[in-house]
Image (spheres, rainbow, N blue to C red):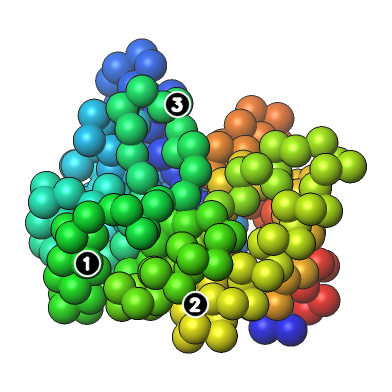
């Protein structure tokens, strides 16, 4: 089975910094630390309200790292313009609501309006690989492909949050979604809520080539250090992938 890359979302390092103000902990320092520990890339989500990562953080990280930066963003003029200037390796277009604590589900591509197609076109023209964060829903996956996205990220939150006895049903839908996306010519990524307990099932889906994990690993850093948590997650992924 092909390798599965791990992109670390460091947003909640910034959340911790912002809780007190000042400059510590530094998201850039966290990005460098997880890359040194074996992470394959960095993910950040620049939200409209700047609740965690801020513009200057993103710019500093983009300039300092030599691995892919995955820039999560809403499909707005502000964010598209920011990404066109930033030129990250990847942009993942996600739904965004001010009232939510975290992203609560996949983007409804079929009802997103005409600007989503413009965002995909402009980002692609800037040389950025465009992904859309969706549920494992056949209609949404086909719609993402028709818009010209190069990848999707499957929302794994419902699977990760479910009781163990409920997970097989969610996992079956994720597997089917991954198969369809690959058949549509899309790269398949996955993320949201994944942990040591749940990563194995996702890593064993052969079409998935990248996972993005953040809050769990930043939280685990309290107990085992951030590099230690990343190394442990990488080992679990390799074991599940059979490599």
Residue depicted at 28% across the width and 20% down the height = 22
- Tell me the quarter of the picture where residue 160 sits: top right
Q: Marks 2 and 1: CB-CB under 8 Å?
A: no
Q: Depth check: 97 or 201 in front?
A: 97
Residue 117, label in figure = 1
- Ranked by sequence position, the earlier of labels 2 and 1 is 1
Q: Residues within 10 Å of mark 2 (few under 14, many from 20)?
A: many
Residue depicted at 45% across the width and 38% down the height = 103
Q: Is residue 125 above or below residue 53?
A: below
Q: Is residue 129 visible?
A: no
Residue 187, label in figure = 2
* 71 left or right, relative to 30: left
Q: Position of residue 233 (x, y in %)?
A: 70, 54
Residue with the most extreme right position: 165
Q: Is residue 193 above or below residue 152?
A: above
Label 2's element?
A: strand
* 162 left or right, relative to 17: right
- Ranked by sequence position, the earlier of labels 3 and 2 is 3
* 46 left or right, relative to 141: left
* 220 left or right, relative to 110: right
The residue that disc 3 covers is 101
């Amino acid at each position: 089975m092909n390798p599965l890359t791990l992109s670390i979302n460091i947003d909640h390092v910034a959340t911790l910094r912002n809780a007190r103000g000042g400059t510590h902990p530094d998201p850039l320092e966290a990005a460098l630390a997880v890359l040194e520990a074996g992470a394959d890339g960095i993910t950040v989500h620049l939200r409209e309200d700047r609740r965690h990562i801020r513009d200057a953080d993103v710019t500093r990280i983009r300039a300092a790292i030599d691995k892919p930066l995955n820039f999560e963003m809403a499909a707005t003029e502000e964010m598209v313009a920011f990404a066109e200037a930033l030129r990250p390796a990847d942009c993942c277009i996600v739904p965004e609501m001010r009232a939510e604590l975290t992203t609560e589900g996949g983007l409804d591509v079929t009802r997103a309006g005409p600007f989503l197609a413009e965002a995909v076109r402009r980002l692609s023209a800037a040389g950025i690989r465009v992904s859309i964060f969706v549920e494992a829903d056949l209609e949404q996956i086909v719609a993402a492909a028709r818009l010209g996205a190069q990848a999707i990220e499957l929302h794994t939150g419902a699977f990760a949050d479910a009781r163990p006895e409920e997970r097989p049903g969610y996992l079956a839908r994720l597997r089917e979604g991954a198969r369809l996306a690959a058949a549509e010519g899309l790269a398949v990524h996955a993320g949201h809520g994944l942990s040591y307990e749940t990563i194995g099932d996702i890593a064993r889906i052969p079409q998935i080539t990248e996972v993005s994990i953040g809050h769990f690993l930043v939280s685990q850093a309290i107990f085992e250090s951030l590099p230690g948590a990343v190394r442990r997650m990488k080992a679990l992924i390799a074991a599940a992938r059979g490599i």
